[in-house]
Image (cartoon, rainbow, N blue to C red):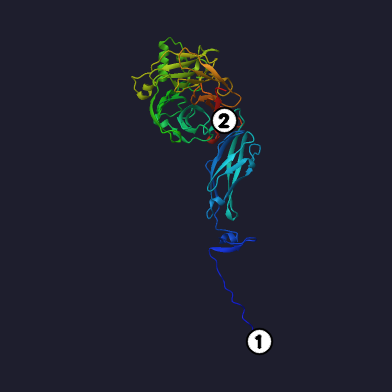
Amino acid sequence: MVPFHAAPPRRTRRVVHAAALVLVAGATTLSALPASAVAGKADYGTPTIKPATSYLSGAVGATGDPTVTVKVGQSGADADALTVSATATTHGSVAETGDVTVTGTGATREVAVQARGKGYTDLTLKVNGLGGKSATTTLHYAASGTVGNAADTRYLTGSSDSSAAVDVGDGYMVVADDESNVLRLYRRDSSGAPVRTWDVSSDLGVDKEIDIEAAARVGDTIYWTGSLGNNKDGEPKEDRFTLFTTTVSGSGADTELEVGGSYQGLREDLVDWDKANGDRLGFAKGTADGQVPKQIDGFNVEGLEFAPGSGSTAYIGFRAPLVPPADGGKALLVPVTNADELARSGSDKDTHATFGDPITLDLGGLSVRDIRRNDKGQYLIVAGSWAAEDNSAPYALYSWDGVAGHQPVKRLDLPTADPGGWEIVVDVPDLTAPGARAQVITDSGSADLYGDGTEAKDLEHEEWKKSRSVSFPLNP
């Protein structure tokens, strides 16, 4: 008898196309995972990591330094599953990987760096995705040194030569740069790049820098003026003689500017007026070919503000000359009594500036670097040397009532231990109010911010250029 052998049980093959059931040790449920995850490979693409900028500036001991927005992604994966970190640094004395903080979820992350020391470093940022895949990018980081008043300091990046500013409401301001014809919109209370920019060159028909040095606002009109002086080589350049206006619409982050009129005859009008009055201020000599503007007897405008209660008479504040042009001389203001007509006149050869009697102010031997008024008729004046390019001479903040013959009062000696020369006071609080503060901004174009001997205005990347803004208490 042939033994009977039972046939082996028939095996059924089940193909799982989209998912496999995986029993996880210690788990009480079955989970469905992608087949690629079970196999330990593959349907995931290579992750991407794209910073909004590859260059970032910070400062040692800073509060609220600028951050970088980073976009990450990976095909086949939820962006929430991706992680971002710093994995390498070229100069740990400037910033180590542990000094990099990444916040946020999903496709958008914010990268912040806390500087250890002054200088440069390249930081490697890495995104780790699913399937064991990753990608890297480089963040080129520059850190300036620690400064006084650090808690009240913010940095305006993208430009180092801030020269004039006007408040536009809701915590924002428009800032000019004397090395370009670009106006920049910044938040007043935080560090970072401009929210919006306007290059006014084409609208004004200018090819070179206007050397914008001063501004004043009346209603929805902002008046801007170039220095009116020769360039640093003593050469007269017509674009620097420009007075122009912009019309403001909106406010805050929604501010819009539209170029209005312009006038290039103010310098010539000032010289002719002074000649007609016995050359008492030396304007003809100060504007002569070969005359450098930043001399005690030079010709250089850095302030503009309207007289008390007026929308037509504007005070032109001079960095040079002093009156008389000698140590201990007084600062000079010249009232332009038809400022509102000038910008509207354009090239009308029948329109010329008219002037009131010059006003001299005792600023302790310093001259006007900026002047600003509030709606109460209270003024603040930034006083500095006619010569100083940075912090090599004294600076002070004076208050004034705007009345000719009344002398200003020193409110504060501005600190000079840190890089940059004080150039701007943004607006004027009620000077009688407890806790009143003034926001003052530097022109840092000549400063060596990062300790490598390079002036800020000559830095290769705009993101590393910056001016310093400090909020100072006026009634401590």
Q: Left or right: where does residue 193 sit relative to residue 203?
A: right
Camera-side residue: 127 or 287? Answer: 127
Which comes sooner in the sequence, label 2 or label 1? 1
The residue beneath circle 1 is 3
Q: Is residue 109 above or below residue 321?
A: below
Residue 163 lies, in percent from the top left, at 50, 26
Q: Can residue 346 be seen from the camera position used here?
A: no
Please state, as top left, top right, bottom left or bottom right, where the C terminus lies in the image: top right
Q: Secondary structure at mark 1?
A: loop
Crowding at label 1, few (<14), some or many (≥20) Cα neighbours within 10 Å? few
**Mark 2 to mark 1 CA distance (whole Å):** 97 Å
Q: Secondary structure at mark 2?
A: strand
The residue beneath circle 2 is 153
Q: Quadrant of residue 265?
A: top left
Residue 241 lies, in percent from the top left, at 43, 23
Q: Quadrant of residue 278?
A: top left
Please state, as top left, top right, bottom left or bottom right, where the N terminus lies in the image: bottom right
Q: Is residue 388 above or below residue 113?
A: above
Residue farthest to the top, as pictured: 278
Q: Is residue 246 above or below residue 49?
A: above
**Residue type marked 1:** Pro
Camera-side residue: 298 or 111? Answer: 111
Q: Can residue 258 be seen from the camera position used here?
A: yes
- Pointer 2 with pointer 1, Cβ within 8 A: no
Q: Left or right: where does residue 223 sit relative to residue 472?
A: left
For image coordinates 64% across by 85% down, the residue present is 4
Res. 61 mark: none
**Residue type marked 2:** Thr
Q: Is residue 351 above or below residue 52?
A: above
